[in-house]
């Protein structure tokens, strides 16, 4: 059953990213550009998504476990450290130069633009490099 | 750079669908819908139970995008303003950054903030400000 909920969530996510126009990097860049051609759509997407998730999550609080799994997997580290800040900043640079972030970039693969493939490939390389560096540091 | 049309209604409606997707994944699987975490999980090539739901989610993300694109005609509007080199740099920074920061626009921006996570609020503020600064400087100071 958890496969069905994953499938439904994936379909909704793809539909939402496409309908909202977020799969189009130029639309994202025109939001991030303070001084140029401005397109404020992204704020509405974030607002709608955040509000819906907030209401939905509140409704789930009364339940002690999800429908098809044994427990809710919630990140519980409260620490705000240099790793979080630095990671978010690097992410911001990457997002700002390309107009792409992981969800829309994966969704955008269906349009088979070579830049989408370049982005997803280098994003994978970035994740694997960071993971490798972390494992070397931890000595594992 | 090229102009795009401000579309608040389809933006809001699309956003609501993204929010619903996050609620479905939490209600069904008890999981945060973070695109970077899901993609990163697939990259482990650890073919366990978690790999299965992540693979199904990602495949359906592509199917949902393709179906919706048929009705919206968005394929004609798609525009990638930057060079392949900048895109590659951006992809690497995004990948490296999401691993360190444990999340992206969906995981922190939507799901984390929806459950009032302080880390997510901080991460979202940082990446939004940095991204706005980066795009603005790149376009208006450097002129790319």
Image: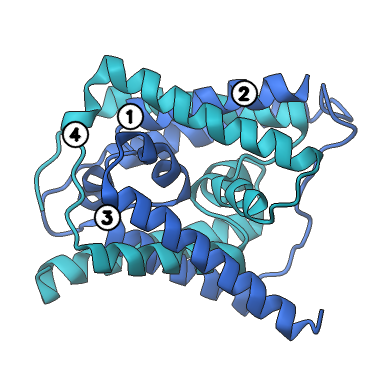
Q: Secondary structure at mark 1?
A: helix
Q: Which residue is mark 1?
A: B11
Label placed on residue B94: none
Q: Which residue is mark 4?
A: B6
- The Cα atoms of the two marked residues, 1 and 2, are separated by 22 Å
Q: Are marks 1 and 4 on the same chain?
A: yes
The color chain B is rendered in: cyan
Q: Is residue B49 above or below residue B99?
A: above
Q: Which residue is mark 2?
A: A7
At 49% from the left edge and 33% from the top edge, which residue is drawn?
A: A49
Q: Which residue is mark 3?
A: A32
Q: Are marks 1 and 2 on the same chain?
A: no
At 19% from the left edge and 63% from the top edge, which residue is drawn?
A: B83
Q: Chain of mark 1?
A: B
Q: Secondary structure at mark 4?
A: loop
Residue depth check, mark 2 versus mark 3: number of the one nearer the observer: 2
- The Cα atoms of the two marked residues, 3 and 1, are separated by 15 Å
Q: Nearer the viewer, residue A106 or B97?
A: A106
Q: Chain of mark 4?
A: B
């Amino acid at each position: 059953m958890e496969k069905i909920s994953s499938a439904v969530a994936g379909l909704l996510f793809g539909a939402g990213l496409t309908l909202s126009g977020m799969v189009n990097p130029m639309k994202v860049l025109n939001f991030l550009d303070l001084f140029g051609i401005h397109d404020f759509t992204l704020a509405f997407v974030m607002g709608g998504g955040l509000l819906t998730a907030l209401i939905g999550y509140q409704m789930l609080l009364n339940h002690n476990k999800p429908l098809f799994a044994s427990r809710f997997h919630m990140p519980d580290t409260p620490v705000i450290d240099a790793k979080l800040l630095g990671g978010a900043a690097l992410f911001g640079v990457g997002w700002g130069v390309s107009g792409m972030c992981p969800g829309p970039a994966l969704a955008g693969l269906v349009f088979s633009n070579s830049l989408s493939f370049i982005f997803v490939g280098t994003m994978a390389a970035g994740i694997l490099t960071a993971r490798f560096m972390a494992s070397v540091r931890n000595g594992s | 750079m090229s102009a795009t049309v401000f579309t608040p209604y389809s933006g809001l409606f699309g956003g609501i669908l993204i929010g619903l997707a996050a609620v479905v994944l939490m209600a069904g699987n008890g999981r945060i819908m973070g695109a970077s975490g899901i993609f990163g999980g697939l990259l482990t090539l650890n073919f366990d139970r978690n790999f299965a739901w992540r693979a199904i989610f990602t495949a359906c993300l592509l199917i949902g995008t393709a179906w919706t694109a048929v009705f919206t005609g968005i394929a004609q509007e798609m525009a990638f303003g930057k060079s392949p080199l900048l895109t590659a740099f951006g992809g690497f920074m995004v990948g490296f950054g999401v691993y360190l920061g444990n999340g992206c626009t969906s995981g922190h921006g939507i799901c984390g903030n929806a459950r009032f996570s302080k880390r997510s609020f901080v991460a979202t503020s940082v990446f939004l400000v940095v991204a706005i600064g980066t795009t603005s400087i790149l376009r208006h100071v450097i002129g790319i």
